[in-house]
Structures are given as structure tokens and as C-alpha cells.
Amino acid sequence: MRIKFKICLLLPMLTSLCSCSKSDKISFQSCDFTFDTYYNDSYFLLDNKEYHEEIALASHAMALATFNGDEDYSVRSKYLRELWEKEHFDNIYMNDSFYQMPWTDSIGYGLASKHISLSKEDFTLVAIAVRGGNYDGEWASNFTLGLEGDAQGFKEATDQVIEGLTSYLKNYSISGKVKFWISGYSRAAIASNMVAGEIIKMYEEKQYLTNEVQYNDDDIYAYCFEPPLGVEITLEDARKEIYHGIHNLVNYNDFVPLVAPFEWGFARYGIDHYYPDRLNDIYFDESEREKIISLYHFTYGAEKFTDYSVDKWKFFDIGEKANENNLAREMVNPSQGRFNHDLIHELAVNGIQTRDMYAKYVQQGIRDLMATIFGLNSDIEKLNLKNLASIIFEYDFVRTLIMELQEDQSTQFAMDVELLFLQIFGANEKNFDMIEKLYNSNALLLSFFANAYKYRKDVLTQLLYRDNAMGLLVCHMPEVSYSFLCACDSRFMGNRKCKLNDGTYKVLHIDKPASFTLFEKNIKKEVFTYKDGKMNSKHLSGEKLADGSLNIYLPNNGAYEYICNSNGVSIGYIDPLKGETLTTNGLPQNGVIE
């Protein structure tokens, strides 16, 4: 899922740094701009269960080549076709939806293949690229979860790709050993993830796509960028070794990979690889951020955002209201990623509460809303999306909404949001009743939203701050993902490259300290101090709660020594999806954390 911006990429400076063989270098187009990637058939002799930067970059290029905002839908597959031709793929096929205006439940995808014979291996490589941008009305499908099973919208998209793939193998008489290369971004990423999972499950059940092809779980190379959740499965089952050929690349600060909610039983197949962040990488200091920002600034669209906005996430003290539930009163280096997780968790657990409630009372209304926004409602004119953000995040109006929800004025909040609906959709005598109907179909969602943050008004206040809200959009933009990928690629950065990780980290709980000092042995720096009631850190994220206790978030690759004077010390373990579990209680006043 992604906000509809006409996002294109331009990375001329990045590609000039790459030390790859000239024969591997390929230029290709995404939207109106040209940039470079690298491809070699030998990538697919590598162990699929291991992450490979070569395949990751080529996969990202394949996913982004599906992005084309041309008003003539009949040419929107052009860039993907051109890329595959340069990589010497044959039998290039695009499904009908790639040539038509996207509808509420359509899916665009392309297929191509080539015979490879290298190092005594002989096989057909089948490439599967799912469209992940410029899909307009398909946004409605992103919000279609259904009552049971895999998320309905993603499942229906997956079924369409599987059906098309099966027909493709038959129509082009593909037989013998086959390997699958699958990629997508955002909505296309979870569809790609589920397509790969379905192919693997079919293999497990000895039901190949056709009787003429052979493959196993070692032959699936799936790289999925910023994928939502969508598979109804336990995390343990989703991460079984048989699915380790599915690699998910995730920015911890992007909210899209958190939906559909894990709390409702959703996950995704394979292994999650997280880009570095202050929470999960002790080396992610200012030099690391500047490295990523410098890459980001060579991409199209970066001039709209002066820096990587997570560094400017704003925390607001809600005052005495924080005392009721022992919420944070102060933060140092506030984390946009932690905010995202709190935001989705509260809405899923304390707002809508269950998948059943969502499917029965929210789903249709939000589907209608998305369809209307993207011009699929003949009674209401398509929105000018460039003006949408300025209307929603107009300062005085946002301040009013914040005050209403802080004071639990839910009725007034609903009335003001109704006025917002009328303004956004340009209400007039002809369309007033239809806009009113659209609002009414989403009124219960607004009620759920108000209830979700009844006890977490700190989350609500951060969300409705205009610059924070715009920052949420930045972290799901493809150029940020691509820049991170390049920053973690030795061909661009050599030994200076960032390292991917599993996204987990620790939280150190300090109960009402008088003083506290934390030293990190790898970078040989004092990384957090608390003295005279003040927190100080240039490296870590931390918060002071209403009762005077501290939470300090520690990357797993750090080695820490601490000295404190407090009522108690404990440490918890945080998984990006499962949340926090207490691991050790009653730690000494002075100690070591490895």
C-alpha cells in the first residue's frame, strides 16, 4: 500500500560509484527518469536461503520498472518490458490489467523467462514482477481483509497471479527444471510474498504448477520491498526454513509493513531484513544517517524533503494527562518507528478490536472511500491529490481536532470530520447527498479511531502534527527504500556499508533513577546519561515516564556498561511484530549488557 504520488527515481551519482562489471550494468526507466541497475544470470546459482545484495538490487529495479504514470494505460508496461529485454528475457507477457485503468480489485503483473545453462546447471528462470505503483483504485483492495483466511484483497491478487503464471507455463511450453524470481513493492510486495509462499506450499503438497515443470523450495528467489502483512499464519510457521528463500526488506519507520495487523493473526512468509535504524544498530550515528541522506538526495523528489524526516520526529508532552497511565513526559531522539507500532497496535486492539469487527463495520466504508478518492465513483469528482494534504493538515483545523480528542469530545470531533469530508470532496447541490452517504459509511471507523487513543493521547497528538504526518509518507517512498538498499550494498559503499538486521532490540527500564550513565564499548563512547533530571544522548532513543522512570532502547549489536542509582533495573526484548517481553528483572545497580 502506498500514498499515490507520481514517484520516479534518479540515481546517477549512485551508479557512478558502483564497482560492478560493465557487462552487468543496465540502464532502465521508471516514470520519467533513467537510472542504472545490474544483472547477471549467475545470481541464480547462489543459495536462495541467504540474502544476496546482487539479487536484492536487481529485484528492486524489477519492482520499480512496473512504475509508470503515463495517462495512456496501454503503454504503462513499457519500462518493465524494456528492462527485461536488456536482461535478455524472452516470452514477455503482461496481463490485461497492466494495459487498463486499475479498478478496485485488479492486479497488474508481468511474466518473462529465459533458459540458463551455467556451471553444469540447466534451468528456465521465470521472472514475476507485480505492479506496485500507479495503481489508483486498487487501493480499495488493500483494505479488504475479509472475515477469515489470508487478507482477502491480497489473496485475490495472489490467486490471479498464480492462475496467470500457470497459464503462462503451459502457453510457452516451459518444462523441466524451473527457478522463480519474484519481486514487488508495497502492495505488490505482499502479493509477491504470497505468490512465492503459494508456490512453495504447492511443492510441499507435490502439486506443481504444471506436470511438466520441476522445482523445490531452493528454487524460489523472492525479494519483497516494504510488504504489508497478509497471511493468516503464526509467525513461527511463516518463518519455517522452507520459506527462507523469501526475503522481505523493511524500514522500521514505515507503517505499511505493519498492516494488516499482526494482532489480528496476520504475518508474511520468509525472513524480514530491516534497514539500519537508531533502535537496531549502534553504528547508526550521524555519519551513517548522513550517508543514507546523501544517497536519498540524489533521487527524484528529494528536494521536497530536506532530510530523512525520522530525525525530526516531534514528541509532545500531553501534560498531566500522561500521569493517568504513566505515559512519557519527555523523549530524547523520539522514534517514528516506535510511534508507528503504537499507532497500529492501539487502533487494532483498543479501537476496532478484532478482524471480525473490521470486516463487518469498517471494510466496505473504507473501500468506498478509497474508490472515490481515485475517481471510481461516477457521482463524485476525482480528488486533486496534490491539494489533499494541505487541506487535511491545515494547522488551525488540526489543532481543533487534537483538542477535541484530548477532551474526549467525540461528537464534536465527528461533526468536524464531516465538514472536512464536505470540503475535501467539493460538496455542492449535486453531490452533497453522495458525500454525506460516504461520510456515514465511515462514521463508525471514526468512532473506533477516537476510542483507540483514549488512553494513548500521546500517540494521537504526535499523529495530528502536520510535519509528523508528512514524515509518515516519506518513509514509504521507494527512493528511501532504494537508498537504504544501496547504503547496505558493498558495490556502492565497500566496507563502509550499512548492515541489515532482524529488527529486534532491547529496552532498559530504570526505575526512578537519581542518576544514570551508559557506556558503549564498540564505539567507545558514553551514549546516554541522566543527571539532574535531564536525559542526554546523541546515539540512543529514550523516554522519561510520568513516574520518573526511564526507558532506554538498546541496539542488539552494542556492548554496554552502566552505572546508576535507582529503585531497580530490568531489561526487555522487543520484536518488531510481537512487541516486548521481559527477559531479566532485578539487575544490579552497576552492570554489563552484551
Image (tube, rainbow, N blue to C red):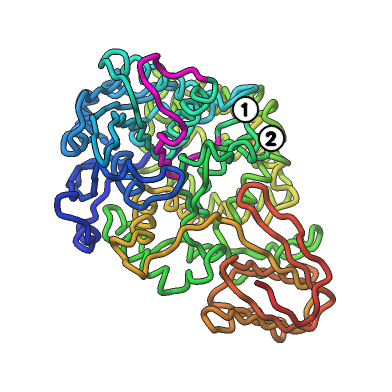
Where residue 54 sits: x, y (%)? 32, 50
User: Residue at label 1?
Assistant: 362
Decide if residue 206 is on the left or right side of residue 63.
right
Where residue 122 sits: x, y (%)? 28, 32
Farthest bottom residue in view: 532
Decide if residue 565 is on the left or right side of residue 303.
right
- Give the structural element (helix, strand or loop) at label 2: loop
Decide if residue 456 is on the left or right side of residue 565.
left
Q: Is residue 217 magenta?
A: yes
Write the start and end of the magenta stretch as one range. 206-229
Q: Is residue 334 visible?
A: yes
Where residue 273 sits: x, y (%)? 49, 51
User: Residue at label 2?
Assistant: 352
Where residue 63 sits: x, y (%)? 33, 39
Residue in view at x 34 percent, y 26 percent: 177
Q: Nearer the viewer, residue 355 or 505?
A: 505
The amino acid marked with disc number 2 is: Ile
Residue in view at x 71 percent, y 70 percent: 544
Farthest front residue in view: 120
Residues marked 1 and 2 touching at CB (< 8 Å) = yes
**Cα–Cα span, label 1 and label 2:** 8 Å
Rendered position, 573 above or below 409: below
Q: Is residue 185 magenta?
A: no
